[in-house]
Every structure is written in C-alpha cells, then in structure tokens.
Amino acid sequence: MSESILIVDDEREIADLVSLYLENEGFRVVKCYDGKSALACIEETEYDLAILDVMLPEINGLELCRKIREKYTYPVIMLTAKGGETDKINGLTLGADDYMTKPFLPLELVARVKAQLRRYKRYNSKREPEEDILTVSGPMMNCKTHECYLNERPLSLTPTEFSILRILCQRKGQVVSAEDLFHLIWADEYYTKNNNTITVHIRHLREKMGDSFEEPKYIKTVWGCGYKIEG
C-alpha cells in the first residue's frame, strides 16, 4: 500500500501542484486548504507524513504540528515564507523534522519527502539485528519499536530527535560533533541545512528530558567539539 501524505496550504495552486508531483510518484495525497479542516483530518486519521504551511487561516501550521506531536511520530515538513527564521526555529522546536522556504522546487520537496520516509521506515523497521535495545544512565531506547524511556518514563520523540539520541547512546562516552550528527542523519539528502538545526533539536531533546542547559545530566555539551552522553 502506498504511503499517505497530508498537504495543508491555503494557496491552492501550491497544494495542487505538490499533490500532482507526489501522486505521480505513487503517493496517496489528502489536501486541506485551511487549518480547521486540517485539524479534523489530523485527529481522525494517521498519515505517513504531513506537509504544513506555517501561515494558515484559523489555525496555523505550528499549532497543527503541535497537535500532531500529541499523538503521532510520523515526519512533518514545514513550509515557511522567505526570511521566516523564527517560524523555522519554532517549527523544529514543536517537533517538525524539516522545513522548506517558499518559493521552492516541487522536485526538491518530493526528494525531501522520500528521504524523511526512508529514515522513518528505517527506524521503525522490524529488522534491527543488533543494538535493538540501547541503555545508558537514564535513557533506554528500543530501536525496534521506536520507543524511548527516561528513568522508566516514556518520552515522545520525533524521528529526528530519536535519531540524534540513538547516535549519542550508541557512542556513549564519546563526543559527537554537530557536523557528524548532521551527516549521519541527513547523509542521503543533497540539499543544504544549517548546523543550527542540530542545536534546535538538542535543545528540544533536553526540554523533553527535563535537562538543564547550564548543568545537564544527560546530553552534555563539550564546547567547541560537540555533544556526548556518559555511559
């Protein structure tokens, strides 16, 4: 069965064009042109990926992203206006996995959709012959079921957050640079990202783990080098 994609954009021409490109690739697409109807779709149906415009009437894309993260972990790509750096950071903080700035090339968006779905499937795959369970001081991760616990308390993580924490746990005691995290997670994608993306995801992870920036117990910053989790 083909993956289902939710597209939410009040600019109908953009939503219809993106839908056409995705349908040509074999995806099933559901389109919404306002936040209210999109919220109903999100609450009633689980999708494989969502593409959300930030600026929407009634309920904006950031609020929709927050609603998705209350129940689901599937990838979310945000569409932002040119120069909307605050929207990008807010989107990542609320659990978005990626963003694109308008105007964009539809083929690049399709490439990002495929990359996000590949990564999401890989981390939810039943074929994890080694390191199914990762345990360090505090976090425990089940790579088979995509579940994470902190001192036996469940953590709801986005696919990107899960990936970052998994890499740090796999390399416990070692410093992993932001650049290495970046390439390990997005190596198969040809487009350019900013290393600030990693910083935002680390900050969001710390918030979910109740970790302080000044005296972190779990994810520690090694200034000028990167991040690490002790064994």
Image (tube, rainbow, N blue to C red):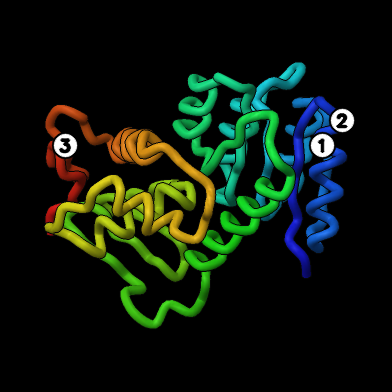
Q: Quadrant of the C terminus?
A: bottom left
Give the side of residue 70 with respect to residue 196, left or right: right
Q: Please report the residue visible at 51 percent of the width from the left and 76 percent of the height from the top.
A: 126
Give the crowd class for mark 2: few <14, some 14-19, many >=20 residues within 10 Å. Answer: some
Residue 217 appearing in the image: no
Q: Which structural element holds mark 3?
A: loop
Q: Are marks 2 and 3 in contact (CB under 8 Å)?
A: no
Percent of width and height locating residue 180:
29, 54
Front disc: 1 or 3 = 1
Q: Are marks 1 and 2 in contact (CB under 8 Å)?
A: yes
Q: Which residue is mark 1?
A: 15
Q: Please report the residue visible at 73 percent of the width from the left and 32 percent of the height from the top.
A: 39
The disc labelled 3 sits on which kind of residue?
Pro
| Residue 7, picture quadrant | top right
Front disc: 2 or 3 = 2
Percent of width and height locating residue 47:
70, 52
Q: Nearer the viewer, residue 134 or 150?
A: 134
Q: Which mark is residue 12?
A: 2
In the displayed structure, 140 sits above or below 122; it is above
Question: Which is nearer the N-term, disc 2 or disc 3?
Answer: 2
